[in-house]
Image (cartoon, helix red, strand yellow):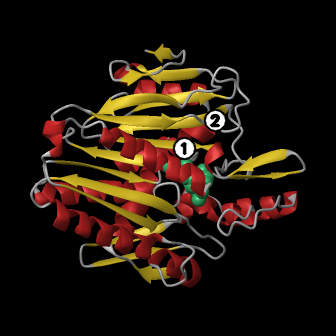
Amino acid sequence: MIGKKIMSCLLVAGVALCLTACEKAMPEVSKDVFAMDTFMNVRVYGENAQETAERCVKEIERLDGLFDAQDPGSEIGRLNSEKNIQISADTFDIICRSGEVSELTEGAFDITVYPVVKLWGFTTGENRVPAEDEIDDALQFVDQSFVEIKGDAADRTASLPDNVEIGLGGIAKGYTSDRLIEIFREEGVMSGIVSLGGNVAAYGTKPGGKPWRVAIENPDVDSKISALKNADYLGVVEVSDKSVITSGGYERFFEDDGVRYHHIIDPSTGYPADSGLISVSIISEDGCLADGLSTALFVMGKDRALSLWSEHRDMFDCILVDDDGAVTITDGISDCFSSGLKYEIYR
Ligand code: AMP
Ligand code: MG
């Protein structure tokens, strides 16, 4: 898993290596950090690149300290154990955004699926296939509407009923990347790019004015799908001021008795989503939405994903890969996507 994450970072690093001599004159600072269980890279261009990159690293560490459900001292860890606590503006906002994505995707995205994710061992790495009755018991407490938040700028609280717990693994990186882009804006840097475990947010264009080129990983990690075999990556999207966020079963999985079980859980079954999709990338100006949607569309499958896009084409675009290797992109990115593979454009 970690190997894949390094790959993602390198792909983005590879993009930055393509800068021309003139672009290289711009002061550039790149910082690596391991947080939220993944490798992250922040790359900033401009006079105050150093301070900006340092602020970004601190922000990543601060948000990780609030959101990490595995840390009993984090706000989410405390909410899960104490059930009713005062929360920060960031925790309030991210729970709010999670609720929006859950509603938009009719529950395919649901942060209360966390106890089921734990049952499968994805929070500790001690993976196992839970018994059916364990899953059924846990599913009674999976429903985003159990999560209550209230308050105003001065006093915010969150509460959960007994047995309900939340995990932000499906949305925290997108939320964080939006905050980092906010810092870029506040600091007035020329341009920059962040890759949080391969989830990319691009600020502005590359220093020379061309769009950032973001490579999407080939989800066929064991070269089993003939349509995808030997492709270095799935394709490249050229973006500026956008996030490109990918979810795939190949990112984290285990095998038991010859069956592969991955980390994206269908909240309606308690089992790893089996929608026929093996990878979903979302391209959007809203990184938090993109992260939530990448997880949700993976659960929903191609038909429902494309019909959601048809209703909300101003909010996002997507790249969907079927388990037979068929690649579909939505019309909004047809001019900025390139690939050596065959793909279909959905209009
Ligand atoms: P991502 O890589 O953004 O798709 O997020 C996957 C992570 O989100 C998993 O490792 C779980 O921690 C969590 N997760 C799994 N299934 C769901 C779901 N249906 N809704 C929300 N979060 C989920
Ligand atoms: Mg996600």
The response on whether ligand 1 sits within 8 Å of label 1 is yes
| Residue occupying image coordinates x 54% and y 29% | 320
Answer left or right for 326 relative to 126.
left
Residue toward you, 317 or 159: 317
| Residue occupying image coordinates x 67% and y 61% | 117
| Residue 89 spot, x, y in % from top left | 31, 71
Residue toward you, 268 or 63: 63
Q: Which residue is mark 2?
A: 278
Answer left or right for 220 relative to 92.
right
| Residue occupying image coordinates x 58% and y 82% | 81
**Where, by quadrant of the figure, is residue 221 drawn?**
top right
| Residue occupying image coordinates x 25% and y 32% | 211
Q: Is residue 263 visible?
A: yes
Residue toward you, 247 or 250: 250
Please, what is the three-letter code of the amino acid marked with disc 1? Ser
**Tag 1 or tag 2, which sits nearer the N-term?**
1
Answer left or right for 319 relative to 266.
left
| Residue 137 spot, x, y in % from top left | 78, 64
**Where, by quadrant of the figure, is residue 206 drawn?**
top left
Q: Which residue is mark 1?
A: 247
Residue toward you, 87 or 177: 177
